């Protein structure tokens, strides 16, 4: 997929559209379940890095 930019972009867009479906906790079986039940995954950002970068560049702001 990394050799095909269009396919990669499509996969990134699909993943971004399904953010609300991503789990809040990792479904871990066995002894690690007690540990994972008390920890949340980090919040997903509203915007992908690529979208942020593109918007930042279009606005003329240099993120450096």
Image: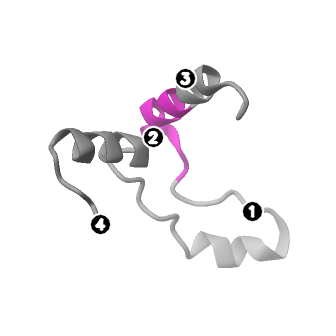
Q: Earlier in the sequence, mark 1 or mark 3?
A: 3
23 lies left or right of 32: left
Label 1 CA crowd tier, 10 Å (few <14, some 14–19, many 20+): few
10 lies left or right of 3: left
Residue 22 spot, x, y in % from top left:
53, 44
Which residue is under mark 1? 28
Label 2 residue SS: helix
Instruction: Identify the coloring.
Output: one colour
Which residue is under mark 2? 19
Mark 1–mark 4 distance (CA, rounded to whole Å):
39 Å
Label 4 residue SS: loop
Mark 2–mark 1 distance (CA, rounded to whole Å):
20 Å
Label 3 CA crowd tier, 10 Å (few <14, some 14–19, many 20+): few
x 47%, y 65%: residue: 42
Q: Earlier in the sequence, mark 3 or mark 2?
A: 3
Magenta residues (range): 12-23
Q: Earlier in the sequence, mark 2 or mark 1?
A: 2
Mark 2–mark 4 distance (CA, rounded to whole Å):
28 Å
User: Which label sits on residue 64?
Assistant: 4
Label 4 CA crowd tier, 10 Å (few <14, some 14–19, many 20+): few
Mark 1–mark 3 distance (CA, rounded to whole Å):
29 Å
């Amino acid at each position: 997929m990394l050799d095909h930019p269009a396919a990669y972009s499509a996969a990134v867009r699909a993943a971004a559209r399904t953010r609300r479906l991503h789990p809040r906790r990792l479904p871990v079986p066995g002894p690690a379940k007690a540990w994972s039940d008390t920890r949340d995954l980090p919040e997903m950002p509203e915007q992908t890095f690529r979208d942020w970068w593109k918007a930042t560049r279009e606005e003329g702001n240099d993120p450096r």
